[in-house]
Amino acid sequence: MQQQTGNLIVDRCIGVLKLDVPTYEEIEHDPSATQQAAIVVGVVAIAGAIGGANEGFGGIVAGLLSAFIGWFVYAGLTYFFGTQLFGTPTTSTTFEAVLRTLGYARVPGILSVVGFIPIIGWLIAFIGAIWGIITAVIAIRQSLNITTGRAIITAIIAGIAAAIITGILGLIFGIGFYAF
């Protein structure tokens, strides 16, 4: 019996949060997980919008749009740098595999939903951000089949490049983008 999509997404999110390597591998190799990863990115963007509730409806729409654009930009740059500069002979992947794993890697960002709570909200959201960096490095390592050191370097270089690109887009369009 095939597992329902909703349950599968939740199970995969839990696996990512637990830093379970087989979960990342499963996501990498499942083409249907791309749509699921998009759902994760959307839910996390909504959680962030709730956490920063003072932005209003326009802020929510801009946040959703920027989350998806930032996801694509970061995944594309990660794929490029990971395969062209920091890859090894064992590096063999597709853009979609990197996109999927990095989409799911955003799940710790759900903690940003509590960002509006005085005193502890920012701390919980910060923990989610750090956790998200860790899940992204594992996603990069697994999807590109590289070492953790190469994955960290790829994450940093792609993050800097994505921040520059999304910053320019933000200036052009007048909205902030999530680069990572």
Image (cartoon, rainbow, N blue to C red):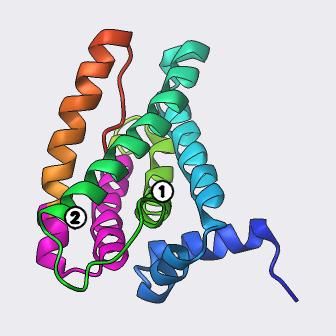
Residue 171 image offset from top left, x and y in percent:
27, 13
Counting residues from the N terminus, which is met first, the one under dot 1 or under dot 2? Answer: 2
Find out whether the residues at labels 1 and 2 contact each other: C-beta distance under 8 Å: no
Q: Residues within 10 Å of mark 2 (few under 14, many from 20)?
A: many
Which residue corresponds to the image point at 48% horizontal and 60% vertical from the top-left? 96
Q: Which residue corresponds to mark 2?
A: 82
Instruction: Please give left or right for residue 9 compared with residue 44 in the image.
Output: right
The quarter of the image holding the N terminus is bottom right
SS state under label 2: helix
Kind of residue sitting beneath label 2: Gly
Q: Which residue corresponds to mark 1?
A: 103
Q: Which residues are magenta?
A: 124-153
Residue 106 image offset from top left, x and y in percent:
44, 56
Is residue 175 visible in the rendered image? The answer is yes
CA–CA distance in space, label 1 to label 2: 16 Å
Which residue corresponds to the image point at 22% horizontal and 64% vertical from the top-left? 82
Which residue corresponds to the image point at 61% horizontal and 69% vertical from the top-left? 31
